[in-house]
Amino acid sequence: MTNEVDDQSRSLGISLAFSAYVLWGLLTLYWKVLKEFDPFELIGWRIATSVVVLIAVVVVTGRMGALLAALRNPHLMWRIMIASMLLTANWTLYVWAVVNEHVIETALGYFIAPLLTIVLGVVVLREKLRLNLKIAVGFALAGLAVLTLSYGRVPWVAISIAATWSVYGLLKKQVPLKPLESLTAEVVILAIPALAYVAATWNRVDSIPNNADAVELVFALLTGVITAVPLLLFAGASLRTPLTIIGPMQYLVPTINFIIGWAIFDEAVSATRFGGFFLIWICLGFVVGDVISSQRVNRTEAL
């Protein structure tokens, strides 16, 4: 009976994780609806509306005490503040890239991010790099070199997206908060500058209040919801599913972005660029294989 309950819980967790990752991937289409507006203004609206939604969720789930304790803790505050700035930079780069026809480059950024996380683990946290991961990093570097040639320039947007997300993840390891309280604390810190920016641009000719039609206005107002929902789904998944399963599933997001950019928005993908992505996909195969192999070893040792 216990095994059956565990299996049901794991199946639910996988479903929740799949839903979260698909929603994150499809956010590209969401932001495309708002492509006529300034990315900085969109991020201001996203933060401002996220504060309302996330605080409401925190209150309903009874986590306000934990949130207030975190905001009063000086040892946590500086990490939360830096994390909030990195998150804002990542969101802004992503939205800017989507509205300026660089969807495939965002996919590249989120493909690179896990690999950069591995590098940070080795360099900063002194984690050991196994052979499979060394090979994976080699393929990733080769793929990045090929993509740099295919773009005719260094793909700075992709690298910046990967860097801000990876360093953000590193800081999150040093913040002992659950995902909901952690993100809420970050957007609370950003609320005042975000609201100030929204207020400053409110009467601008091309601003959202003065230029958006009914659909665009609804989409702008719901940016807080589309921020919170995938996070809550992911939080539910992480409680029920091993990281060794939901970890590799994260590659659904850049894969969806790649398909959207290529198949829907007709972004140019030359044979050379496909070759670069193919090298990165080989790299991801080594990463997933290493995770599965490590899990088997751990189970064997446990027996």
Image: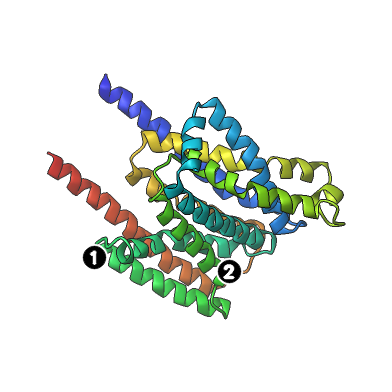
The answer to whether residue 240 of the structure is visible from this angle is yes
Q: Position of residue 211 (x, y in %)?
A: 85, 51
Q: Nearer the viewer, mark 1 or mark 2?
A: 1
Numbered disc 1: secondary structure: helix
Residue occupying the point 48% across, 53% down? 78
Q: Position of residue 300 (x, y in %)?
A: 14, 44
* Mark drawn on residue 131: 1
Q: Is residue 283 left or right of residue 292?
A: right
Q: Calculate the distance from the C-alpha at mark 1 to the C-alpha at mark 2.
A: 32 Å
Colour logic: rainbow
Q: Identity of the amino acid at label 2?
A: Val
Q: Is residue 10 left or right of residue 162?
A: left
* Mark drawn on residue 171: none
The answer to whether residue 16 of the structure is visible from this angle is no
- What is the quadrant of residue 141 in the picture? bottom left
Residue occupying the point 27% across, 56% down? 290
Mark 1 vs mark 2: which is more N-terminal? 1
- What is the quadrant of residue 223 in the picture? top right
Q: Is residue 127 left or right of residue 191?
A: left
Residue occupying the point 57% across, 76% down? 151
Q: Which residue is mark 2?
A: 269
| Circle 2 Cα neighbour tier, 10 Å, few/some/many (<14 / 14–19 / ≥20) | some
Name above or below for residue 252 compared with residue 151. above
- What is the quadrant of residue 152 in the picture? bottom right
Q: Identity of the amino acid at label 1?
A: Leu
Numbered disc 2: secondary structure: loop
Name above or below for residue 103 compared with residue 63. below
Q: Position of residue 135 (x, y in %)?
A: 30, 68
Q: Quadrant of the C terminus?
A: top left
Residue occupying the point 45% across, 43% down? 73
**Which one is nearer the viewer's eye here, 256 or 80?**
80
Residue pushed farthest top?
A: 1
